[in-house]
Amino acid sequence: MEDSTLASFSPGVCRVLRAAQKLSTQRAYRYKWDKFVEFLNDKNILLSLVSLANILEFLMSLSDLGLLLSSIKGYLSAISYHYVSENKPSLFRDPFVKRFLKGLNKLHPPCSMPAPAWSLDLVLSKLALKPFEPMATADLRLVTWKTAFLVAIMSARRAGELCALRADYLRFHKDKVVLRTDISFLPKVVSPLHTSQDIVLPTLAPNPTSEEKRRIHALDVRRALAFYLDRTSGSRSTNRFFVCYSDPKKGLPVSPQRFSKWIMNVIHLCYELSGRPCPEWVRAHTTRVVEASSAFLMGVPLEEICKAAIWSQSLTFVRHYRLYTRVRQDAAFGRAVLLSGLH
């Protein structure tokens, strides 16, 4: 087992080996491993006598509960991590495990989620008007939501990374604003390219001279960040940029879960202000779908998109995020067929 194997190393080496996984991954693996041990106890199976058949039965029980193949693989990863031996290879290399996972994939093929149904144009049009404006006198709750949404939609970063932004690292320039996370924050992809990376956001119509430019300037992220920093200066008790706006946690760092809730609240409120029902499938994470796909359709190189969104490879975007592109391509095919019959 993992603990007994590490016992042969010094405490310093063990600490470094454990640091190969993020704390969140360690907690997730421990939870999944405990579930596996609980399954063995219910079957009166000693941990030292675990067989491959027992492991496959456990995976089968997860499938019977309705877990997706990706989740089942997560449990298998946790078991592989803890159930190690010098004479045993990774469970994923076992031919029977390979066949089992392949069989699950055929019996329960994965399905792609539909493209996000909410409209970015609608949300942005409402953010430029009351009650989000003027930001100097608008409710702090709405100022917070608007700033969070603009930073999220323009940076393509995850909620956890945006919650780790430091207010004292913020730098305003004439044509851009530069943000950076706390030095202790580790992104999902830990590499020299993605760690301690500056988040550079451009300004929009810095000197508006017309009604149209003033409307665009109302969506300027540099302006929103400045107003938000000023409005929260008297209550913040942390160096983290985004803080809670209501008691009892006012001024304290916001959690990624709460930050995601802000993004969803913005979308729901903007639809309510427009008098339209908000689509059912609205998640904060869909902002990454919208912004990445929009940038791709505007001709931004795929490498730049992956760098901004902290993806280690372009395949992640192609498989899971290029939803609008696929939808438009499908529509273009049908339109071409229809128009060919009209000529």
Image (tube, rainbow, N blue to C red):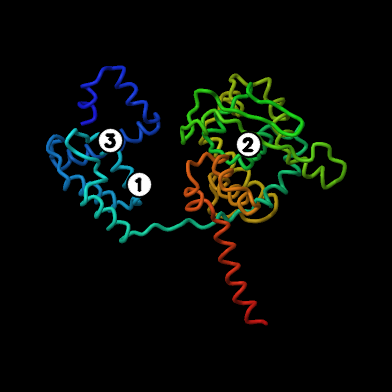
Residue situated furthest top in the rendering: 11
Above or below, comparing residue 170 to residue 82 in the picture: above
Q: Which residue is mark 2?
A: 148
Q: Earlier in the sequence, mark 1 or mark 2?
A: 1
Relative placement, left or right, of 4 versus 264 is left
Residue 295 point in image, percent of width and height: 63, 49
- Which residue is more in the foreground, 335 or 254? 335
Relative placement, left or right, of 221 versus 313 is right
Residue 317 point in image, percent of width and height: 51, 49
Say what amino acid the circle numbered 1 marks. Answer: Ser
Above or below, comparing residue 43 to residue 100 in the picture: above
Tell me the tag on residue 81.
Answer: 3
Q: Which residue is mark 1?
A: 71
Say what amino acid the circle numbered 3 marks. Answer: Tyr
The answer to whether the residues at label 3 and label 2 have Cβ atoms under 8 Å apart is: no
Disc 2 secondary structure class: helix
Question: Quick one: quadrant of the N terminus?
Answer: top left
Residue visible at 28% across and 35% down?
81
